[in-house]
C-alpha cells in the first residue's frame, strides 16, 4: 500500500470516487467535496477534514486515526467496521449517519448532537462525551469504559448492557434511561448507597 504524506487536497472535488487500500498521512482535505466517496480498507492518519463535505459517503473497514473533523458535513454517511480512534469532532452534525461495529475510542465528541442515533455495540472507551447530547439514543452494549461523561445528556437512552464507570454514573444526566439490574446496583453504589439482599 502506497502512503500519501502531506498531500494538499484542500478545495478538491473528489465526488463519487471509490478508494480501496489507499493510505493518507497528514493530508489536508479542508473544504474538499467528497460527496458519495466510497472507501474500503483505507487509512487516514492525522488528516484534516475541516469543512469537508462527506455527505452520502460509505466507509467499510476504513481507519480515521487522529483526524480532525471541524464543521464537517456527514449527511447520510455510513461507517461499518471502521475505526475513528482519537479523532476529534467539532460542530459536526452526525445525526442521520449510520455507524456500525466501529471503534470511537479516545474520540473527541464533546457537545456533539447524537440524539436518537443507534450506537449499539460501539466502542467509546475513554471518549470525550462532555456535554454531548445522546437523548433517546440506543446505547445497548456500548463500551463507555473510562469515557468522560460530565453533563452528558443520556435522558431516555437505552443503556442496557453498556459498560459505564462509576464516574459516568455520577456525572451524566440519566433521567428516564433504561438500565439493567447490574447497572442499577452500580448506580446505587456510585451514589453512596449500600445495597443489601
Image (cartoon, rainbow, N blue to C red):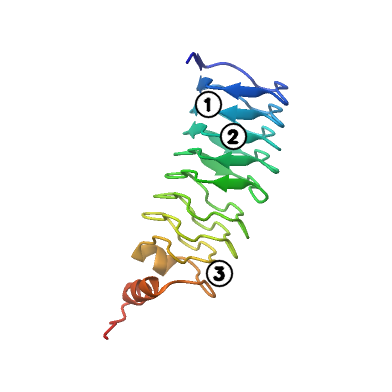
In the image, 85 versus 153, the foreground residue is: 85
Lower position in the chain sequence, tag 1 or tag 3: 1
The answer to whether mark 3 and mark 2 are in CB contact below 8 A is no
Q: Report whether residue 28 is seen.
A: no
Give the mark toward the camera: 3 or 2. Answer: 2
| Disc 3 packing (10 Å; few <14; some 14–19; many ≥20) | some
View extreme (top): residue = 2
Q: Which mark is residue 165?
A: none
Q: Secondary structure at mark 2?
A: strand
The quadrant the C terminus occupies is bottom left
View extreme (bottom): residue = 197
Cα distance between the residues tagged 1 and 3 = 36 Å
Q: Secondary structure at mark 3?
A: loop
Cα distance between the residues tagged 2 and 1 = 9 Å
Q: Report which residue position mark 1 lands on.
A: 42
Question: Which residue sits at x=38%, y=70%?
Answer: 183
Q: Report which residue position mark 3 lands on.
A: 155
Lower position in the chain sequence, tag 3 or tag 2: 2
Q: Write down the quadrant of residue 153 in the picture.
A: bottom right
Q: Write down the quadrant of residue 75 in the picture.
A: top right
Question: Which residue sits at x=35%, y=77%?
Answer: 188
Q: Secondary structure at mark 1?
A: loop
Q: Report which residue position mark 2 lands on.
A: 59
Q: Position of residue 39 (x, y in %)?
A: 59, 28
Give the mark toward the camera: 1 or 3. Answer: 1
The answer to whether mark 2 and mark 1 are in CB contact below 8 A is yes
Amino acid at each position: 500500500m502506497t502512503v500519501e504524506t502531506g498531500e494538499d487536497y484542500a478545495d478538491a472535488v473528489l465526488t463519487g470516487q471509490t478508494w480501496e487500500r489507499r493510505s493518507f498521512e497528514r493530508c489536508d482535505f479542508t473544504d474538499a467535496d467528497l460527496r458519495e466517496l466510497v472507501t474500503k480498507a483505507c487509512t487516514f492518519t492525522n488528516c484534516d477534514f475541516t469543512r469537508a463535505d462527506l455527505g452520502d459517503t460509505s466507509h467499510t473497514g476504513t481507519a480515521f486515526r487522529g483526524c480532525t473533523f471541524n464543521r464537517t458535513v456527514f449527511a447520510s454517511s455510513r461507517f461499518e467496521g471502521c475505526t475513528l480512534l482519537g479523532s476529534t469532532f467539532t460542530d459536526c452534525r452526525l445525526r442521520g449517519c449510520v455507524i456500525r461495529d466501529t471503534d470511537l475510542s479516545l474520540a473527541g465528541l464533546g457537545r456533539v448532537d447524537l440524539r436518537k442515533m443507534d450506537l449499539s455495540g460501539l466502542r467509546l472507551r475513554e471518549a470525550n462525551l462532555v456535554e454531548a447530547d445522546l437523548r433517546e439514543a440506543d446505547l445497548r452494549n456500548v463500551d463507555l469504559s473510562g469515557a468522560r461523561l460530565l453533563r452528558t445528556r443520556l435522558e431516555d437512552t437505552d443503556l442496557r448492557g453498556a459498560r459505564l464507570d462509576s464516574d459516568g454514573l455520577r456525572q451524566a444526566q440519566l433521567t428516564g434511561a433504561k438500565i439493567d439490574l447490574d447497572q442499577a446496583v452500580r448506580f446505587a453504589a456510585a451514589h453512596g448507597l449500600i445495597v443489601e439482599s
